[in-house]
Image (spheres, rainbow, N blue to C red):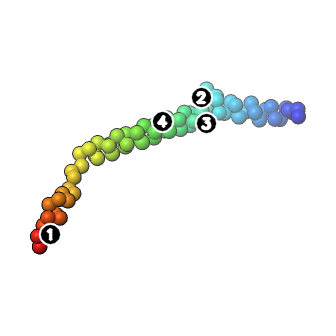
Amino acid sequence: MALGPWQIAIVLVLVVLLFGGKGKISSIMGDMGKGITSFKKGLKDEVKDAKDAADEALDVTPPKATSQKKKDKS
């Protein structure tokens, strides 16, 4: 399958648009990469915050031994 002049021109235009020095699409791709990186970092921070909150939580469960003794005496 031979490439014609139109196929080569289309491929070159796409390469220049995607990987060009100051093209709008290349800056959009860079911003998208930064967004993905900060999103992943945010997910990791939420996991750390959840672990810290779990460590600070108070245990309000009543003790089992005292509640059973009171029910037996009644």
Q: CA distance from mark 2 to mark 4?
A: 22 Å
Q: Locate residue 18 relative to residue 55 in the image: left or right.
A: right
Q: Tell me which amino acid carries mark 4.
A: Thr
Could you tell which of marks 1 and 2 lies nearer the N-terminus?
A: 2
Which residue ends up furthest to the bottom in the rendered image?
A: 74
Q: Could you tell me how many numbered marks the image carries?
A: 4
Image quadrant in which you'd find residue 61:
bottom left
Which residue ends up furthest to the front in the rendered image?
A: 72
Query: Dot 2, how many residues are within 10 Å of its Cα: few (below 14), some (14-19), or many (20+)?
Result: few
Q: Secondary structure at mark 3?
A: helix
Residue 74 appears anywhere in the view: yes
Residue 31 appears anywhere in the view: no
Q: Position of residue 71 (x, y in %)?
A: 15, 69
Residue 72 is labelled as: 1
* Quadrant holding the C terminus: bottom left
Q: Tell me which amino acid carries mark 2.
A: Lys
Which of these two is toward me, 49 or 66? 66
Q: Tell me which amino acid carries mark 3.
A: Ile
Nearer the viewer's eye, disc 3 or disc 4?
Answer: 4
Name the residue carrying label 4.
Answer: 37
